Amino acid sequence: MVPGKERISIDGWVVRIRKPSGIGPFPVLLMLHGWTGDENSMWVFASRLPAHALLVAPRGLYPATQAGYSWQAEHSRVWPWVDDFMPAVERIYEKISGGSIPEGDFSQLHLIGFSQGAALAYTFSVLHPEKVTSLAGLSGYLPDGADSWIRPDRLKGLPVFIAHGSADDLVPVERARASAEMLEKAGAIVTYCEENVGHKLSAKCFHGLEAFYKHVDC
């Protein structure tokens, strides 16, 4: 259990939320965990996120082989494709933003994901750009096949924060650099932070994430 957070169920789907003080509806900050994570994993970032936003952390749809949960069904490919994340994208699109959380203003939807959760956040954004107000991808990657969705106006003006470790041995930094380039080609305004760490955020990138949210409409 995570103290101070409310655990809810949306048609049997476990989601943990944190409501800000005051009267809503509130901007929504959707926190998407990585592979083998769950609805508790992303709260390590909460102190860097806007206090006036409604934080929503859903559990991945599929049990992971080792432990925890995943946002995609198991497959034998090295890297997932956009299509692998479509069931999770549609679940979020329909269930979370469909009135199940009345305190949330889903016209102000901010996505933040770590690792596989970043891949899901990227996929959601390229599939439903009109629904996304800002995007943060931490130690993540654009799934294969995303280039078929990229065109100059797809993400026009979307604020994006990307953080990655140059010593990441799970998601090579080259994938983060390529993701930043592709998102910029789609018109996104990308803030990129890279430090010599592994599969995690450096202190500098933590500060960069906090600064990013001070400049977006959240």
Image (tube, rainbow, N blue to C red):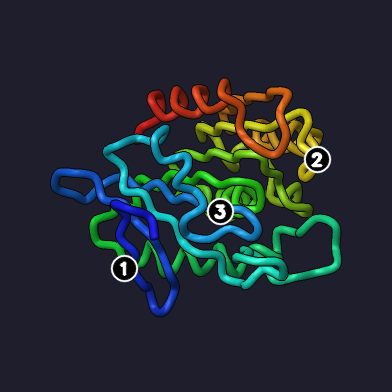
Q: Is residue 60 left or right of residue 93?
A: right
Q: Amino acid at mark 1?
A: Ser
Q: Residue at x 60, y 38 (%)?
A: 153
Which quadrant: the C terminus? top left
Vertical relation: 182 (above or below) 65:
above
Residue ID for mark 2: 169
Q: Residue at x 78, y 45 (%)?
A: 170
Residue ID for mark 3: 33
**Which badge, 3 or 1, comes first in the chain's sequence?**
3
Query: Gap in Å between the C-alphas at discs 2 and 1?
Result: 38 Å
Q: Residue 11: where, in percent of width, then height?
A: 39, 79
Front one among 146 and 76:
76
Q: Amino acid at mark 2?
A: Asp
Front one among 24 and 168:
168
Q: Is residue 1 left or right of residue 129?
A: left
Please rate how many residues cluster around mark 3, counting C-alpha atoms within 10 Å: few if below 14, some from 14 to 19, many from 20: many
Q: Amino acid at mark 3?
A: His
Q: Is there a contact, CB below 8 Å, between mark 3 and mark 1?
A: no
Q: Residue at x 68, y 24 (%)?
A: 194
Front one among 113 and 145:
113
Tell me the number on the disc at residue 214: none
Tell me the number on the disc at residue 100: 1
**Which badge, 2 or 1, comes first in the chain's sequence?**
1
Closer to us: mark 3 or mark 1? 3
Dot 1: element: helix
Q: Is residue 65 visible?
A: yes
**Which badge, 2 or 3, comes first in the chain's sequence?**
3
- Residue lying at the far bottom in this picture: please name it: 12
Dot 2: element: loop
Which quadrant: the N terminus? bottom left
Q: Is residue 130 visible?
A: no
